[in-house]
Amino acid sequence: MPAYIIADITEITDPATFQDYAGKAGPTIPKYDGKARIVRGKVETLEGTWKPTNLVVLEFPSVARAKEWYNSSEYHPLVAQRQKASKGNLILIEGL
């Protein structure tokens, strides 16, 4: 069953550091069979008050594989860099 990591980066506080993070993080995703499905595309709110600013959706073949990526030696050290350069939310959700 596929799994999705959804990030809503609500504020980029250090654009240069965030850009460096993104350049390093992107190549780690395919190593864990992940695919970027949405990367900061245009968002239109149809209902409610949620207004994502920088939405990212990553697809993995399973929750286990998504967690492997997130906790990997390639990606996990980059989490601190992302958190230093931005504010936001990150969730993992099982799909269909």
Image (cartoon, rainbow, N blue to C red):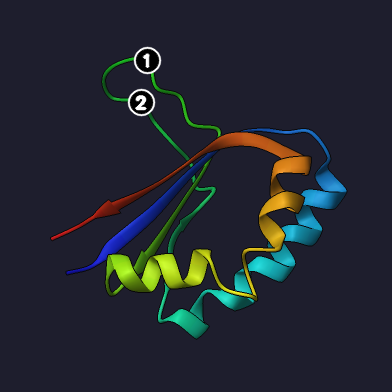
Give the image location of residue 30, x and y in percent.
49, 81
Q: Residue at 78% of width from left, 42% of height from top?
A: 84
Q: Toward the viewer: 4 or 75? A: 75
What's the mark number on residue 45?
Answer: 2
Q: Going by the image, does 54 lie left or right of 61?
A: right
Locate the C terminus and report the quarter of the image it occupies.
bottom left
Label 2: few (<14), some (14–19) or many (≥20) C-alpha neighbours in 10 Å: few
Query: Where is 56 relative to 89, above or below?
Result: below
In the displayed image of the protein, which residue is found farthest to the left? 96
Please tell me which residue lies in front, 18 or 70.
70
Q: How many marks?
A: 2
Give amino acid for label 2. Answer: Thr
Residues packed near mark 1 inside 10 Å, few (<14), some (14 to 19) or many (20 plus): few
Residue 25 rendering spot, x and y as whole percentages: 65, 67
The N terminus is located in which quarter?
bottom left
Circle 1 sits on which residue? 49
What residue type is disc 1 on? Thr
Q: In the rendered structure, are the residues bearing label 1 and label 2 in contact, judged by CB atoms less than 8 Å apart? A: yes
Vertically, is 22 above or below 81? below
Q: Looking at this view, name the residue that lies furthest to the top.
A: 49
Please provide percent x and percent y for residue 23. Answer: 73, 67
- Residue at 58% from the left image edge and 34% from the top image edge: 88
Residue at coordinates 36% horizontally, 74% vertically from top-left?
65
- Between the residue at mark 1 and the residue at mark 2, the CA separation in whole angstroms equals 7 Å
